[in-house]
Amino acid sequence: MSIPVITEQDLDELAALYPDLNFTDDERRAVLLEGQSRDINAAPGSGKTTLLATKLMLLGRKWNDERRGICVLSHTNVAREEIQRRLGSSAEGSRLLAHPHFIGTIHGLVNHFLAVPYLRSNGLEVDVIDNEIFSQRALAKAKSNWSLRTWMEQNVGVQPMVEGLIFKGPNLELASEGGRLPSEKAKTFPILQKIKRELAKSGIFRHADMFAFAEQHLEASPRLIKLMSQRFPLVFIDEMQDTSWEQERLLQLIFDDTVIIQRLGDINQRILVSEDGAKNLSFPKADALPISTSKRFGPTIAQVVASAQLSEVAVAGTGLDAHAPMLLIYPTEKVDKVISAFGVEVLKRFDDAAIQGGPVKALCARKQGDAKKAVAGRTLLDYWPALAQSPASATQLGRFWSLVTGAGTQTGETSLMGRTDEIRRALLLVLRAAKSQAVTNVTGGHQLLRRLSEAGIDVGKVRRLMRDLAMDTLSVAGEEGKKSLPSIIFWVVQPVLPAEMTEQNFNALEIFHLPDAPDVAVLKPNECAIDHEGRKFCVQIGSVASMKGETHLATLVLESLGHPSRRFDVQEALPVTAGLKERDKKISDGLLSQFRNLYVGLSRPTSFLCLAVNTERVSEECKSALINLGWVVSTVE
C-alpha cells in the first residue's frame, strides 16, 4: 500500500467536518498537504498539535493497510492526549488509536518494540523502569559499602552520580546522568559497576537504560531496521525541539530512508534538551515549513514574544489585544510581595468568571540557586519561599494507587498493553505486602501470572481483573471504587494468601492506604492566595519548564539570575523589548538559554502579560520607552 495523499478537496471538506477549526491560511494548508519528509517550525499558540491531529484524521480516512501503521511520537502528555481526543471524536480518526498504529512517547516506542522484548529474550525481566525507584535502590546499595559511603560524606556530588547510573550505547558502558564517574582504575568504579549490574538483574532500570538496550538490539539484529521501517512507513514527531541528540540519533537508527518523517516543533522553545551532543541536532532543517501566526494572543503580546525570539520568522499574533502589558517594579525589600501585587492587578482587569476559567500563573526560569551576593530576584524562592517546603511524599504510600489509576507512568504510555503492565506490577506489590509465598523471588510483573498458575490459582479471574482495571470499568479513580477494590482483589487472590489472612486484615494492608487529603483551606506550597476587596482566587506558581505548553489567562514572568552567565534575564531583555537596542548576535550559550526560557514564559498568556524586575535593574530610559509603546509601569508598594 502507498501512503495516502491529502488533496485540496480534502481540505475543502474540513469546514463541514470541523466547523470550529480554520485552516484557510497558506501556511497551515501547506503543512496539511505536505506528503514528504519535512520539518514544521510553529509559533507558540499556533494550534500545531490540533493541526497534526487534523492531518492524522484525514490520513485515517484513507488508510486501509491492516499491518502497517502511522507512528506518532510526542514528548508531552498534554499534546498526546489532545491528539487522541481529536482522533477519538470521529470514526475515521478512532482507527488510528489501535493496531497497527502507535501514538505515544519516544520512550514508549523504544520500550515496547525494542528494549523490553530484547531484555526478555535474554532472560532479564523488567520489574520497573523508574528513575526515582532506581535512585533509591542504588543509593541504598551505595550506603552499604564503606568506600562509597565515605566518599559520599566527603563529596556532595557523589550521591547524584550514584543515583543516576545508566547504561549507555550498544556496549552498555557505565555512565551517569547525575555526574562524572570516577576513573575506571579507581577502586570505587567496580563497586558502581556491581550496583548497576545487580539492579539490572533485579529488573530495576532507569529510562535511559532502555535506549542502550534498544541500540544493542538493533546492532545484534540489523534486520529490525527494515521491519520497523515497513511497520511504520509514516512517522510524525511532535515537540521536536525537546528531542535530545541521543533520542534523535536512536530514531535515525530505527527508521531507514524509506520512511516519511515529519517533525513539528518550535526551535525557540528548546529549553528541556541536554547540551550533550546538542550541536548535532538537526531540527529545523533549512527547508522547514513555518507556521508564524499565533491564535493565542494579539499583536501586542506577540511583539513582546518576538523580542525574545532567537530565530525563524517573527511571531505574529492574530488574537485580540485584551490588556496592555505591564512592568511591575519592586524594591528589594518587597520581593515577596510581587506575586500578590500581580494578583491584585489581575482582579482589576478580569471578572470572576474569566479568572475561574483561567488559569493565572507566575513563573520563573530558575527555582533555586546559590548566588547569595546578588540582589533579590535571583530565583523563584526569593519571590515565594514557601516553595522550599517539602510536603510529605506520597511516592511509597501511593505507589499502588498511582499504578492502578495510571498516574504512575513516567513515559506517558496509555496503550492497553502499557496499562496492563502497570496493573500487573500493582498486583505484585499487593501480594508482596500480603507476604504471599507465591511471589517469593518474583522480580518482575511479567512473571506473575506464571507463578500464580503454578500455585494453583484461577488465572482467568486474575486476567479479567487486570482487564477491568486497565480499562477502568471498576472506576477506581473515584472514592467508592477505591473503597471496594481491596475486597475485589482479595477474593481473586485469596487462594495464594497466608491461611491467617482475612478479608478485614487484607483490606487494612498499608499498601491500600491513601495519603491524607489536605484540608481544602490549606494552600499548596505553589499557590498564592489573593484576597482583595472581597474577591478571592489563587495564583499558581512554578518554573518555566513546568508550564511549557500551557495557555494562561494571565502570566507573571519573574526575573531570574542565569547560570553560568550570572546575568538577569529580564534586565537583559527589557532594552531589546523597549526598542532601545538590538540583541547581541554573538550571544553566549548561557544567555541564549535564558532568552529561550523567556520566550516560553512570555508566550503563555492570552490576555495579560506582566514582567517583574528589581528597581535596581531597570533604567528610567527603559521605563519611558515601554510607556511610549503602550506598557503600564507600576511599582510594588
Image (cartoon, rainbow, N blue to C red):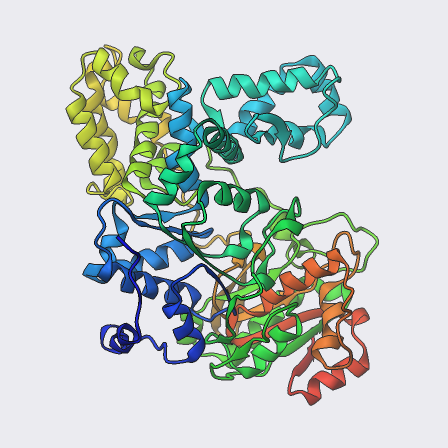
Closer-to-camera residue (334/281): 281
Residue lying furthest right: 373
Quarter of the image for residue 515 reads top left
Left or right: 259, with 383 as reference point: left
Left or right: 416, with 432 as reference point: left
Quarter of the image for residue 312 reads bottom right
Closer-to-camera residue (583/280): 280
Q: Residue 391: x percent and y percent?
A: 54, 42
Closer-to-camera residue (613/175): 175
> Which quarter of the rendering shows the C terminus?
bottom right
- Give the total number of marks visible in the rendering: 0
Residue at 22% of width from left, 24% of height from top?
490
Q: Residue 482: x percent and y percent?
A: 27, 38
Left or right: 310, with 20 as reference point: right
Above or below — where is 383 with respect to 454?
below
Q: Residue 191: x percent and y percent?
A: 65, 16
Q: Is residue 483 visible?
A: yes
Q: Residue 493: x percent and y percent?
A: 22, 21
Q: Is residue 398 visible?
A: no
Quarter of the image for residue 340 reads bottom right
